[in-house]
Image (cartoon, coloured by chain):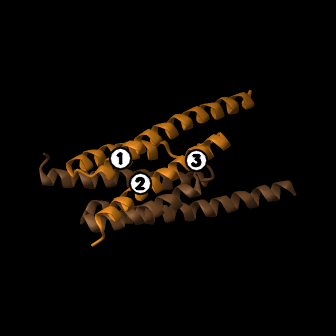
Chain colours: A brown, B orange
């Protein structure tokens, strides 16, 4: 069995790693101004899953599951909002190009 | 407190929702043959996080955390492999275009 403090660090690190991945995705999207290859359903389904994980975490009294998933929802909303903005811009540009 | 059976269903559903999002991302990538907007670091960091979640899940004896994260790693590898393939193809096409 792992020591409780070490287990807490593992829980925190696990959350941080996954959320860092999404921050990196946001930065990449911001730099390239394109998120068209990223599926919007990915963000929607992750948000749905995260809501259930939060309920699960509350029942299990697990702060790492709760914390990770609250942050995940905020990040998903940010990526979705950014994608919407860039997709619309791309669509507008393409429409102009056809004229 | 929620009944244990309902909690299990929530745990399974939470995992299924998030993983369905990634399956959808894979299908979208396969259809468009493009994953250039998806950050490779997203998949790498999620894999790292998932490995830690598995350790955490084993210690917490939580089958839903373990199951979700094992499947997540397999999906991340699939997206990463697909992205690599399409990115290379895109690079080759662009190089040809410049000639």
Label located before the other in sequence (1 or 3): 3
Report the chain holding disc 1.
B
Q: Which residue bears the numbered disc 3?
A: B37
Q: Residue at x 41, y 43 (%)?
A: B71
Toward the right, the furthest residue is A99
Residue A48 placement (x, y as % from top left): 47, 63
How many angstroms separate mark 1 from mark 2 (CA)? 8 Å
Quick check: can you spot residue A71? no
Quick check: can you spot residue A90? yes
Task: Report if the CB atoms under discs 1 and 2 are less than 8 Å apart.
Answer: yes
Instruction: Please identify the quarter of the rendering in which residue A49 is found.
Output: bottom left
Q: Residue at x 58, y 51 (%)?
A: A38
Question: Looking at the image, is B29 positioned above or below residue A5?
Answer: above
Label located before the other in sequence (3 or 2): 2
How many angstroms separate mark 3 from mark 2 (CA)? 25 Å
Q: Which residue bears the numbered disc 1?
A: B67
């Amino acid at each position: 069995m792992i020591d409780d403090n070490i287990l807490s660090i593992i829980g925190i690190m696990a959350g941080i790693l996954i959320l860092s991945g999404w921050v990196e995705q946001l930065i990449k999207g911001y730099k390239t101004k394109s998120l068209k290859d990223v599926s919007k359903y990915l963000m929607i389904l992750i948000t749905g899953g995260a809501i259930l994980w939060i309920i699960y975490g509350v029942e299990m009294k697990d702060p790492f599951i709760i914390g990770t998933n609250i942050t995940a929802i905020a990040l998903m909303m940010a990526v979705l909002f950014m994608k919407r903005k860039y997709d619309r811009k791309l669509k507008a540009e393409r429409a102009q190009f056809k004229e």
